[in-house]
Image: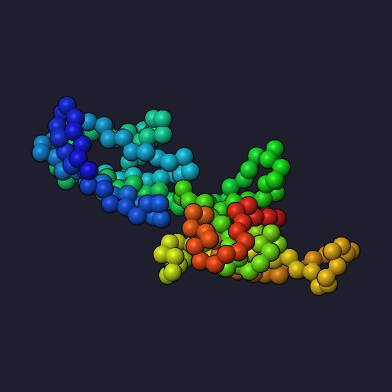
Amino acid sequence: MSVFNKITDFIKCQKTEYPWDGRVQIVLALDQQADFSLHIRIPSWCRDFEVKVNGRIMRGTNRKLRRGYLVLARTWQDGDEVVLELPMPVERVYANPNVRETVGLVALQRGPVVYCLEEVDNGPNLPAIILPDYPAFRIERDPKLHVPVIVGQAYRLEQSGGDLYTLEEPRKISAEIKAVPYYIWDNRKSGEMLVWIKSF
């Protein structure tokens, strides 16, 4: 990426696997040293981040954001390196309780990517799946989809009889679930898809 300004011309080499990985590496190629501010976007989903300039962690006032951007103002040299680390844990997303259709439900998000359940991975009747309070998720790379997927333990409600209504409480059966990026659903087999999942 070439950038031109009134001070000097420089080339910015950026390496990242975002949005699947939160590491962003920027290396500057300058024809001469120059004083300017480098603005780096910190996405709203990110609760915390770490930034290093030439291996040194920036702390305190050096980490303050301006309208969603981290501003790095300094004298830059040829070959200076900025490394941004955006942690990407699996997060639960909650809708406003005024949205009646999603009351008591959660969606799964990792970084900027929202995930969903598909019947091809989790079987039929996806609304019978319930997430525990503190599920342990892990990230795996799907060899067929070529993207990270979320895998974790949940519960599936099952009823012993076929009656529509009964005084018997449904059983909670432990079940492993697999969530895939929402944008990729319906690319294998037709079936159910679910974004908003029941939660204890």
Please name the residue shown 44% across and 69% down the image. 144
Among all residues in the image, which is located at the extreme front?
A: 190
Q: Quadrant of residue 154?
A: bottom right
Determine whether 130 is above or below 14 in the image: below
Residue furthest right as drawn: 167
Numbered-mark total: 0
Residue 136: x and y, percent?
A: 57, 62
Closest to the observer, 63 or 12: 12
Q: Is residue 169 above or below residue 26?
A: below
Write the residue at 67% across / 46% down: 102
In the rendered image, residue 166, in percent from the top left (x then y), is placed at: 88, 64
Q: Is residue 29 visible?
A: yes
Q: Position of residue 185 (x, y in %)?
A: 52, 59
Q: Is residue 157 left or right of residue 63?
A: right
Residue 176's image quarter? bottom right
Residue 110 seen:
no
Please tell me which residue is depicted at 70% across the width and 37% down the height of the picture.
Answer: 98
Colour scheme of this structure image?
rainbow
Occupied quadrant, residue 158 = bottom right
